[in-house]
């Protein structure tokens, strides 16, 4: 596939190739994880959905922050991008109380040093979105950190900038998604510096893998919400009584088909572009 490109790494979902000193090729696979375990079964086109959605957002958020996208390849899953020096933190924004944010709040009444009103229930919308950075764990789970710990890693002034940019990106996307029937409960950005010292948005952005997407029509605070994209796969895995440690179970055909349909639906709702049109010509998301 990537001609004369050096394979430089494998993430959980992406393969990374160096095109030259300044450019990388990110190739998104169809791998899926549930409960943090990569399953042996792939979801056809999932990598294309993630790539197309990221590119859609990159093309619409340049005024908020420049990004690493240089070109989309015709396969719909490969992104040519500027190579960045990534910051050592995950830039998480939460608009709703879920996952580790909900856990931390239940125990301490705060998330990453943000004191929150008392009496919030699971999945409640927060009075305003909050920036809750995390460390980039090389193994295991990312760990939420407070402002001081994050400032220690990147410096206080840069942290202020990163927080402003992350909140602005989230607000923009959450408003758009809300109008299309998807709640973006929280999301994670990865930022880095290019060789001219500019702060640039990298990685994937505002996809179902880097965010919690909830179907707006089913949203009710006071408990866990169904995942827009992974619910079939999760429910199936839970129904087996699987202990949620690797290796994960194979998914049967109907669960694969249902899950694929949800990823495609997320793409079509958010972009208002038919997925078949994306497959025919990925650049449609950039217009
Ligand atoms: N423009 C970029 N320059 C350098 N590294 C990048 C860039 N964009 C993304 N990355 C890195 O590429 C990897 C993406 O692969 P992925 O499968 O998503 O990994 P992970 O398992 O860490 O989520 C991440 O480690 C991310 O930090
Ligand atoms: Mg990733």
Image (spheres, helix red, strand yellow):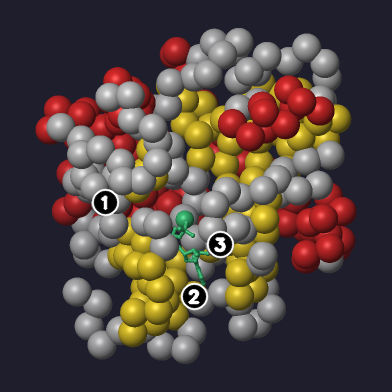
Give the CA distance from mark 2 to mark 1.
23 Å
Number of the label disc, if any, that sits on residue 30: 1
Of marks 2 and 1, which one's residue comes earlier in the chain? 1
User: Where residue 205 appears, x then y in whole percent?
Assistant: 50, 51
Q: Look at the numbered disc 3 and give the secondary structure of its residue.
A: loop
Give the CA distance from mark 2 to mark 3.
23 Å
Q: Nearer the viewer, mark 2 or mark 1?
A: 1
Please tell me whether residue 26 is drawn above or below residue 30 in the rendered image.
Answer: below
Of marks 2 and 3, which one's residue comes earlier in the chain? 2
- The answer to whether residue 262 is left or right of residue 99 is left
User: Where residue 244 appears, x then y in whole percent?
Assistant: 40, 36
* Residue found at x 38% / y 68%: 10
Q: Which residue is mark 2?
A: 82
Q: Which residue is mark 3?
A: 138
Residue 114 versus residue 215: which sits nearer the camera? 114
Please tell me whether residue 118 is drawn above or below residue 7 in the rendered image.
Answer: above
Any part of residue 197 in sight: yes
Q: Does ligand 1 reach within 8 Å of label 2's beta carbon?
A: yes
Q: Look at the numbered disc 1 and give the secondary structure of its residue.
A: loop
* Residue found at x 12% / y 33%: 253
């Amino acid at each position: 596939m990537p001609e004369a490109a050096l394979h430089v790494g494998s993430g959980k979902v992406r393969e990374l190739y160096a095109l030259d000193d300044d450019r990388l090729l990110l190739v998104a696979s169809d791998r899926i994880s549930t409960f943090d375990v990569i399953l042996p079964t792939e979801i056809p086109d999932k990598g294309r959905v993630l790539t197309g959605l990221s590119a859609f957002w990159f093309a619409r958020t340049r005024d908020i922050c420049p990004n690493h996208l240089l070109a989309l390849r015709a396969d719909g899953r490969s992104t040519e991008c500027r190579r960045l020096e990534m910051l050592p933190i995950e830039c998480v924004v939460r608009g709703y109380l879920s996952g580790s944010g909900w856990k931390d709040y239940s125990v301490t009444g705060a998330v990453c040093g943000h004191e929150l009103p008392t009496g919030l229930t699971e999945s409640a919308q927060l009075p305003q979105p909050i920036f809750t950075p995390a460390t980039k764990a090389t193994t295991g789970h990312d760990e939420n950190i407070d402002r001081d710990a994050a400032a220690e890693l990147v410096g206080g002034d840069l942290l202020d900038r990163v927080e402003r940019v992350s909140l602005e990106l989230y607000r923009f996307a959450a408003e758009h998604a809300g109008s299309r029937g998807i709640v973006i409960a929280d999301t994670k950005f990865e930022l880095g510096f290019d060789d001219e010292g500019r702060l640039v948005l990298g990685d994937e952005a505002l996809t179902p893998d880097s965010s919690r997407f909830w179907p707006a029509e089913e949203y009710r605070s006071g408990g866990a919400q169904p995942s827009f994209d992974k619910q079939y796969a999760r429910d199936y895995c839970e129904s087996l009584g699987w202990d949620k440690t690797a290796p994960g179970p194979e998914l049967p055909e109907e669960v694969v088909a249902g899950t694929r349909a949800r990823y495609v639906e997320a793409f079509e709702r958010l972009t208002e572009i038919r997925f078949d049109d994306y497959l025919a010509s990925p650049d449609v998301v950039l217009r």
